[in-house]
Each structure stands twice: as C-alpha cells, then as structure tokens.
Amino acid sequence: MANTRKSTKRAAQAKNRQARNQTVRSATRSAVRTAFDAIKAQDLTQAQAAYKSAIKALSKAASKGAIPKGRAARKVSRLTLFVKKTLPAMLTTSKSK
C-alpha cells in the first residue's frame, strides 16, 4: 500500500503501464501466432501479410519497451528462418517488390 502522495501516483502509473504493456504483448503474440499458422497453411498471400504484420508488431513492441529488444530480434529471426524453411518463395517475392 502506498504511504505518500508520490508513491500513490507511482503505483497508479505502474498499473497503467502494466495494462498498456499487457495489451501490446498480447497483440504481438497474436500476430506472431497468426503468422506461424498462415505459413504452416502454405497460403502465400495470407502468409506474406501475416509475416509483415508480425515483424511490425514485434518491432513496435520493442521500441515501446513492452518487450526487450533482444527478444524481439530473436523472434523475428526465428520467424524468418521458419519462413525460409517452409515457404522459400515467399521471401524472394517480397524482396523483389
């Protein structure tokens, strides 16, 4: 329990940050899961959109401090490796645009 006005304010700020970060992390996890599912389904157009969305969500979450930058980089790397292994044509077509 907060004893001073300052500590009460800090507790409220921490609670707000925690709620904001939780929604960002949840949306990021959903985007990554959607990307993996789309890639597993071998649907090229849907996989490209989901891959791009997942990369964007991870980068944004890392830049906002909701997740560590290293974790975001690791997840992007693993997702890209999975794409290269499962749908190699996807990355060659997306880079040519």
Image (cartoon, rainbow, N blue to C red):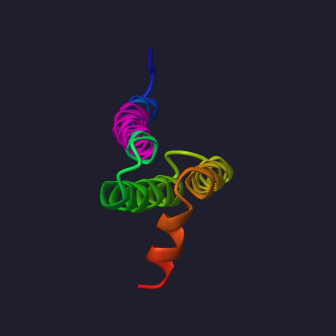
Residue at image coords 50%, 60%: 59
Question: 51 or 96: which is nearer to us?
Answer: 96
Question: 67 or 58: which is nearer to us?
Answer: 58
Q: Position of residue 15 (x, y in %)?
A: 38, 31
Residue 83 falls in image quadrant: bottom right
Q: Position of residue 67 (x, y in %)?
A: 55, 45
80 shown above or below 97:
above
Prevailing secondary structure class for the magenta stretch in the rendered image: helix
Residue 17 falls in image quadrant: top left
Q: Quadrant of the N terminus?
A: top left
Residue at image coords 64%, 46%: 71
Position of residue 70 in the picture relative to residue 87 (left or right): right
Q: Quadrant of the C terminus?
A: bottom left
The image shows a total of numbered marks equal to: 0
Residue range corresponding to the magenta coloring: 12-36
Q: Position of residue 84 (x, y in %)?
A: 61, 58
Residue 57 falls in image quadrant: bottom left
Residue at image coords 60%, 49%: 82
Q: Is residue 23 magenta?
A: yes
35 shown above or below 87:
above
Position of residue 76 in the picture relative to residue 14 (left or right): right
Q: Position of residue 63 (x, y in %)?
A: 51, 60
Q: Residue furthest bottom?
A: 97
Q: Is residue 81 magenta?
A: no
